[in-house]
Amino acid sequence: MQRFANPGRFLRLARAVYPWTAGLAVLCLAAGLWFAFVASPPDYQMGETVRIMYVHVPAAWMALFVYTNLAVAAAVLLVWKHPLAELAGRAMAPVGACFTALCLITGSLWGQPMWGTFWVWDARLTSVLVLFFLYLGYIALSNAFDDPTRGGKAAAILALVGVVNVPIIKFSVDWWNTLHQPASLTRLDAPAIHASMLVPLLLMAFGFTFYFVAVTLIRIRTEILARRLRALQFSQGASEVAAASPRQVSA
């Protein structure tokens, strides 16, 4: 990973990878939405409401996936002082927060016709809400200091502390008696879902993943360029002060 610590090398890699990830995201999302809202049949129990699940479930997967990557970046920053780890965390956190918000909103829309309410203090729902607040806390901490490095370290500590919430979310339906249905795809025997519904779920999951990679690359590139701009402005300001000092002394 130290090979990509050089910002110039990373920017070259990002320019090469971005078109592929962006193109695959568009293709997977277009195909997934078509299968989800046109080709996929209604569920025998949920009816047309099942179509919300094709957005809700992949968004929930991505909320956990992005936070796990955020925690890995935080560990790399604190342990190995990798220069791009802080920028990666800053880039990923807003994307993960958006996926978590999408998960909560679509889950509430599904819960109203299925449970008769938009929200219950269910173990799974509550822990996902905590995850959303962890994302917001990370974003707030990373921007709370004048020195970006101090903000990045403080946010990294929060990310590592909050990673304990990830297994709680994953296994909450097994540990507690909740309204939320158990896992359908990660069972040891076989996925308890028909292929006509599995296809749009996987397409949307791949689409969200490629979207996440593409947007993260853009955001890291923007962070690198912003840091370079601030460094140039600081250098220019220091030069102007140094040039003005001899004139003031001579005067």
Image (spheres, grey):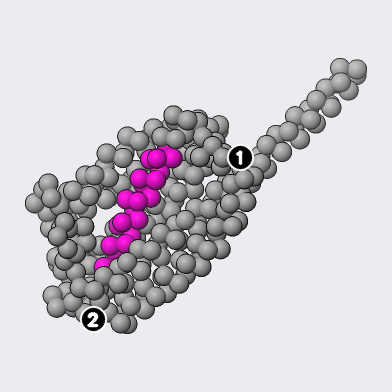
The amino acid type, in three-letter code, at marker 2 is Pro
The residue positioned 49% from the left and 44% from the top of the image is 88
Residue furthest toward the right? 250
Question: Relative to 191, does residue 73 appear above or below in the rendering?
Answer: above
The reply to whether residue 50 is visible in this rendering is yes
The reply to whether residue 112 is visible in this rendering is no
- Give the quarter of the image for residue 194: bottom left
Q: CA distance from mark 1 to mark 2?
A: 50 Å
**Residue bearing mark 2:** 41
Q: Which mark is residue 176?
A: none
For mark 2, give the secondary structure: loop
Magenta: main secondary structure equals helix
For mark 1, give the secondary structure: loop
Which of the two labelled residues, at mark 1 and mark 2, occupies the earlier sequence position?
Answer: 1
Image side of residue 231 versus residue 23, left or right: right
Nearest to viewer (mark 1 / mark 2) = 1
Q: Which mark is residue 6?
A: 1
The amino acid type, in three-letter code, at marker 1 is Asn
Q: Dot 2, how many residues are within 10 Å of its Cα: few (below 14), some (14-19), or many (20+)? A: some
Residue furthest toward the left? 177
